[in-house]
Amino acid sequence: MQNMADNDLYNLGALLQCHLLDLLIDGPSSFAALYGALIRHCGYPDTLEVPLVLNALLEMEQQGWVKALQIDEEGYFHVPTDEDRKNNLYAYCMWLPRASFEELSLDEIGLWYELTSEGRARWEGLPDDSVNSLRQWKLDDSSDTSTIVIQAANTEIAKEALRFWLFYNPKINIVNGSMTIEPISDLSLSNGTKIINGVKVSWRYQLTPH
């Protein structure tokens, strides 16, 4: 499940952008808050690379879906310059991988994003299944038993969530034939979504030797 064609890599990049659109739909957000939400609510690993997220947002800017704003020392917003972006990349790389979720509520580096009208139209134009599936799974990594457990609305969403998670955790290899499926009557996700008659799907894994 580790080998992916170019179109698969594109689809995973598009999924990251869908998550970012979904996180911004309710209002502007600092980059630190977006980064934390991807890990806390969207299933990304805490090793998520800062440049990956910044590049995804830059592509969304170029598409006209989001607008980036930089806060200066006097508290005024301006469009970030190339120098701002270079400094932001360094500062976020030094801070975010080590920060707690509580620390992310105050982004002193000062990069913010908001949806444009085109971005909102893009989000509204996504297929229902694409938008809904973003919030229909929950992943737990039981490292003591080398088991991945995904609770989801259905098995297909669980498999897609696993595939997505493996892409960002390339050192993990799923043990062939280890998948088990159990029905669950209800599931509450951290974002408040309630799922009735879902599934709990488990896989055992091995770590790739260094």
Image (cartoon, helix red, strand yellow):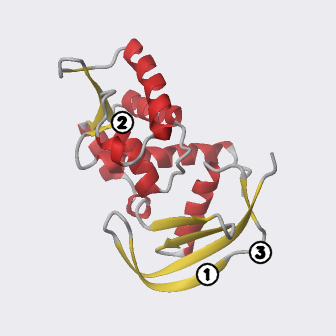
* Residue type, numbered disc 3: Gly
* Residue type, numbered disc 2: Phe
Q: Which mark is residue 177?
A: 3
Identified at 42% across, 42% down, the residue is: 35
Residue 183 lies, in percent from the top left, at: 53, 86
The C terminus, quarter of image: top right
Residue 22 lies, in percent from the top left, at: 34, 51
Is there a contact, CB below 8 Å, between mark 1 and mark 3?
no
Compare marks 2 and 1 and give the one earlier in the sequence: 2
Between marks 2 and 1 in the image, the one whose residue lies nearer the viewer: 2
The N terminus, quarter of image: bottom right
Residue 157 lies, in percent from the top left, at: 52, 67
Q: Secondary structure at mark 1?
A: strand
Seen in the picture, residue 120 relative to 109 is either above or below; the reply is below
Query: What residue did someone put label 2 on?
Result: 31
Task: Give neighbour class at mark 3: few <14, some 14-19, many 20+ (Cα, 10 Å).
Answer: few
Q: Secondary structure at mark 2?
A: helix
Task: Give neighbour class at mark 2: few <14, some 14-19, many 20+ (Cα, 10 Å).
Answer: many
How far is disc 2 from disc 1 in space, using C-alphas?
Answer: 37 Å
Is 202 left or right of 105, judged from the image as shown?
right
How far is disc 3 from disc 2 in space, using C-alphas?
Answer: 40 Å
Query: What residue did someone put label 1 on?
Result: 181
